[in-house]
């Protein structure tokens, strides 16, 4: 059987032909995907060869690409490419079957000589000692050995990621082994955990993947603050406990941000009502840009509730301060997982402010210009993702059946927030900067100058003042008020 490789990007094809080495084998996911007929970007290929460093450096020179050693314990060399990467593994004794026996899943424990792979000649030259090809036909993940997860616990997250991204289903033995060994995930480096988690969070099957993480016990180990919400009652407002509410909220978020009509009559109806907003380019672009921090914040948005729960004399449940505490807990956990600082700050902001879209107006009244100006000033480019977090949170709280009759009002509320424009746009610049305010008022540098500047900006945005002269007069009046209140 011969399989075409013409669909590979040009750099990837060039890279394959740059890998000139006797006894070199293509192993792992590249073989699996080629046999399964899956074509994915970015290009990612593993090579096993007797002298990994020499092979990698020759290829790097041919491609004018850097060569980086990935591990000090094993000879693994990476060649980063514009459209992917090549990892070259050392195969000191030339025993490819022995190398395959150390791998994770049978579908990844296959090899093809490099030369045959380059020409798309896979199956005739396939080395498959563990029956991986048969498991590919069944789309099943099966362990190569019973100790595979203990040898590298990160493989448990990889199994979830392959199921989320590609639909590969763990067999019963693998599921049982994951439950047995879940606590061992702590042995894996935080950076490696995050690499897998990031891909899981971005997958279309995220709600299903979260269920697999929960069933295996991995969720308890990775996000213990999240699973502490089990059995934390929120009635009468919420239908579910804190933990399942957050899982349900992620499910609704994936539906409300979908690019095609989601399954289910209720979900489809809710999604269609959002289409006038989702077709606005700036809104869709923002949701795409914030996809990862938004999903992560949705998952963790109520982790502050278990520690802030109280019940008043009337029997009502309260969680005062849970947003602020949740943001702090999320920051600590995500920092430990070595997430990029920018992503941590984005998640922290969304969690801390997640109640704000519902509080931006008085009950029964539309939000005022002043409230909307302050909302956008505080949130900046996080305003759009925060509104979708609010919508999904509301659905997870009340349920689709209860909210569907009122859904149009929720969408209108979000539209009002997102389409609001100040009377004086930011692009027009400030009427007075800090130096001008100090010249007018005689103040010295300090927080009072910033406070006056913010109030002038707000007055200009609301159309309460026009022009520099009115801004100067307002600055003087505000300075006098601050002086009198001191």
Image (tube, helix red, strand yellow):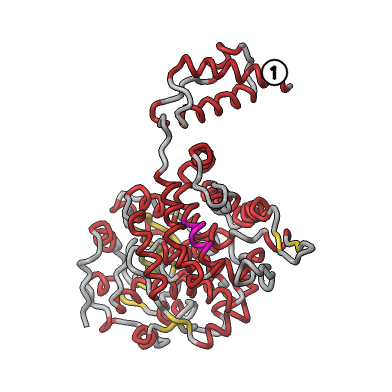
Q: What span is in magenta? A: 388-394
Pick the front one: 378 or 340 = 378
Image coords of residue 305 (percent x, y):
68, 61
Task: Say if residue 158 shows up in the picture.
Answer: no
Please tell me which residue is depicted at 32% across the width and 63% down the height of the picture. Answer: 41
Please tell me which residue is depicted at 68% across the width and 68% down the height of the picture. Answer: 228
* Main SS, magenta residues: helix
**Above or below, 478 relative to 165:** above
Quadrant for the C terminus, please.
top right
Residue found farthest to the front: 364
The answer to which quarter of the image holds residue 2 is bottom left
The answer to which quarter of the image holds residue 165 is bottom left
- Report helix, strand or loop for mark 1: helix
Pick the front one: 317 or 378 = 317
Task: Say if residue 86 shows up in the picture.
Answer: yes
The answer to which quarter of the image holds residue 60 is bottom left
Q: Is residue 148 magenta?
A: no
Residue position marked by numbered label 1 in the rendering:
483
């Amino acid at each position: 059987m011969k399989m075409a490789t013409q669909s590979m990007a040009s750099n990837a094809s060039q890279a394959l032909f740059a890998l000139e080495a006797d006894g070199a084998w293509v192993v792992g996911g590249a073989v699996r995907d080629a046999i399964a007929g899956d074509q994915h970007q970015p290009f990612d290929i593993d090579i096993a060869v007797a002298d990994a460093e020499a092979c990698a450096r020759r290829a790097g020179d041919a491609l004018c690409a850097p060569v980086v050693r990935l591990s000090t314990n094993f000879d693994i060399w990476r060649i980063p490419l514009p459209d992917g990467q090549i990892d070259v593994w050392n195969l000191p004794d030339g025993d490819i079957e022995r190398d395959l026996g150390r791998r994770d899943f049978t579908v990844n424990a296959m090899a093809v000589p490099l030369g045959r792979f380059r020409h798309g000649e896979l199956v005739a030259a396939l080395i498959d000692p563990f029956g991986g090809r048969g498991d590919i036909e069944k789309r099943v993940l099966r362990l190569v050995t019973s100790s595979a997860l203990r040898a590298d616990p990160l493989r448990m997250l990889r199994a979830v990621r392959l199921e989320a991204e590609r639909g590969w289903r763990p067999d019963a033995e693998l599921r049982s082994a994951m439950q047995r060994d879940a606590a061992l995930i702590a042995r894996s480096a935080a950076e490696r955990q995050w690499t897998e988690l990031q891909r899981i969070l971005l997958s279309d099957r995220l709600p299903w993947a979260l269920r697999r993480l929960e069933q295996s016990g991995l969720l308890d180990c990775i996000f213990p603050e999240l699973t502490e919400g089990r059995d934390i009652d929120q009635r009468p407002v919420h239908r579910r406990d804190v933990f399942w509410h957050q899982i349900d909220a992620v499910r609704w978020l994936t539906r409300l941000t979908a690019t095609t009509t989601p399954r289910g009559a209720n979900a489809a109806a809710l999604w269609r009502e959002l289409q006038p907003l989702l077709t606005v380019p700036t809104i869709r672009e923002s949701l795409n840009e914030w996809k990862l921090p938004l999903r992560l914040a949705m998952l963790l948005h109520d982790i502050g509730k278990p520690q802030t729960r109280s019940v008043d004399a009337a029997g009502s449940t309260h969680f005062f301060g849970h947003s602020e505490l949740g943001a702090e807990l999320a920051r600590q956990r995500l920092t430990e997982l070595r997430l990029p600082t920018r992503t941590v700050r984005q998640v922290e902001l969304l969690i801390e402010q997640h109640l704000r879209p519902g509080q931006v107006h008085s009950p029964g009244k539309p939000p005022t210009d002043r409230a909307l100006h302050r909302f956008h000033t505080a949130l900046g480019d996080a305003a759009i993702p925060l509104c979708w977090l609010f919508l999904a949170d509301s659905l997870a709280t009340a349920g689709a059946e209860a909210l569907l009759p009122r859904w149009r009002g929720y969408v209108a509320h979000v539209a009002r927030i997102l389409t609001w424009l100040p009377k004086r746009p930011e692009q027009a610049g400030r009427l007075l900067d800090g130096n001008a305010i100090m010249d007018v008022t005689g103040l010295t540098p300090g927080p009072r100058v910033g406070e006056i500047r913010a109030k002038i900006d707000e007055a200009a945005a609301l159309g309460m003042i026009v022009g520099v002269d009115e801004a100067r007069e307002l600055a003087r009046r505000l300075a006098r008020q601050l002086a009198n209140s001191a």
